[in-house]
Amino acid sequence: MMLWARDICLSGRLDDVTAKLEPGKITAICGPNGAGKSSLLAVLAGLLSPDSGEVQLDDCLLASLPAKQRARRIGYLPQVGEVAWNLSVEALAGLGRLPHGDGASDPVERALAAVDLANMRHRPASTLSGGERARALLARVLAGEPQWILADEPLAALDIAQQLAMLRHLRKAADQGAGVVLVLHDLSLAMNHADEVVVLSEGRLHEKGPPEAALSRSVIEEVWQCPARWLGEPGARALQLG
Ligand SMILES: Nc1ncnc2c1ncn2[C@@H]1O[C@H](COP(=O)(O)OP(=O)(O)OP(=O)(O)O)[C@@H](O)[C@H]1O
């Protein structure tokens, strides 16, 4: 049970990246702007084909899986939070059931509750605030109850209470066996909430390991070229910059 990117090369974006991701964990992908985080996530989701290398999902190659099966097993939330059609929140979350073709309502209800949008279920997506829209799009992913949740900056538009609620929900999903992979710019969130951190730099894998090691002060200074130090205790770290 794993999602394994092997020797991934993608012209100008990823250079021989290998990373084995485990279910039951929250893995954060971190790195400076342009480091290749979104590209790697899209490759892991099977939405971007690498020039060379392959992604293995459990015992099969991702590229060999029919799109519907892939969509059942991997839920992907892109970075740009656009809603193409002006659906209601409930209908938008319901799209997460499409790969299953069952129109089941219980997973949609659970997803709406998880993102705290059950009371806005009839609101057209066009009337939502940025953070509400981000949560509705996340509800679509959660409603599919995928084995892997791959989300590109899912917390960026959320207030701190919603961030915490979402992290608790993602932790619960991981505890129940899902693999959770999050692109995060906020290194404190990665440090305090991830089990594993993948650090990319200029398209290459720089570090992979537990947060205290992968996001050490020396790694941050080398990769982000930014003086920084961690304050506080493990699990409740704050990053002081400068
Ligand atoms: N469609 C594309 N064609 C060519 N190059 C691209 C394409 N999309 C992104 N890139 C380039 O690939 C590199 C990695 O982009 P990517 O979006 O994966 O980085 P990122 O780490 O997610 O960045 P950010 O933190 O800014 O979101 C960047 O230099 C970017 O300009």
Image (cartoon, rainbow, N blue to C red):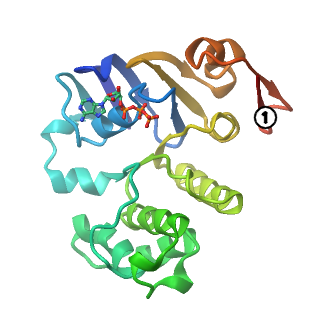
Give left or right: position of 144 versus 210.
left
Above or below — where is 130 with respect to 181?
below
Image point 72% across, 17% down: which residue? 227
Which quadrant of the structure image shows residue 48?
top left
Quadrant observed for ligand 1 in the rendered image: top left
* Residue 156 appears anywhere in the view: yes
Q: Position of residue 203 (x, y in %)?
A: 37, 19
Residue farthest along the front direction in this orientation:
242
Q: Does residue 106 appear anywhere in the picture?
A: no
Tell which of 185 and 171 is nearer to you: 185
Which residue is identified by label 1?
Answer: 237
Q: Is residue 5 left or right of residue 217?
A: left
SS class, disc 1: loop
Please identify the quarter of the rendering in which residue 131 is found.
Answer: bottom right
Position of 228 with respect to 93 (left or right) is: right
Question: Picture coordinates of residue 220 (x, y %)?
Answer: 64, 19
Q: Nearer the viewer, residue 196 or 130?
A: 130
The amino acid type of the residue labelled 1 equals: Arg
Q: Give the percent coordinates (x, y) of residue 72.
A: 28, 57
